[in-house]
Amino acid sequence: MANTVLASQSTTSRELARNTDGKGCRYKQALEKAAQRCSEAAKPSKMTPKMISDIKQNIADRVESKADIGLATRSKRAAD
């Protein structure tokens, strides 16, 4: 059967096990389950202009914060 559907034997076996119950392979039920799995799958998010702006601001804040820490350290050393 695997050669007929051009899939590996393990893939065919797994799909038959997934889509078979006590009454045999039920293709309508298998299609419904596949559609449900597809709709529940995580979808990648697209980078919106707002997301890009927020990321750039976050990076700028971190760089500024590290610069402030460096200035404070140098000031403390100069005072000592």
Image (spheres, rainbow, N blue to C red):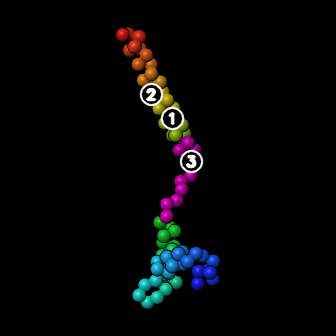
- Front residue of 75 and 4: 4
* Label 3 secondary element: loop
- Label whose residue precedes the other's in the sequence (1 or 2): 1
Of the residues shown, which amino acid type is indicated by label 3? Thr
- Label whose residue precedes the other's in the sequence (2 or 3): 3
Provide residue 78's location: percent of width, then percent of height.
41, 10
* Label 2 secondary element: helix
Reading the image, the residue beneath label 3 is 48
Q: Residue at x 50, y 67 (%)?
A: 39
Provide residue 42's location: percent of width, then percent of height.
49, 60
- Front residue of 15 and 47: 15
Q: Quadrant of the N terminus?
A: bottom right
Q: Residue at x 52, y 84 (%)?
A: 27
**Relative to 5, 13 lies left or right:** left
Reading the image, the residue beneath label 1 is 59
In the image, the segment drawn in magenta is: 41-52
* Label 1 secondary element: helix
Quadrant housing residue 76:
top left
Q: Quadrant of the C terminus?
A: top left
Q: Residue at x 52, y 40 (%)?
A: 55
As drawn, 73 above or below 8: above
Q: Nearer the viewer, mark 1 or mark 3?
A: 1
Reading the image, the residue beneath label 2 is 65
Between the C-alphas of marks 1 and 2, the distance is: 10 Å
Of the residues shown, which amino acid type is indicated by label 1? Ile
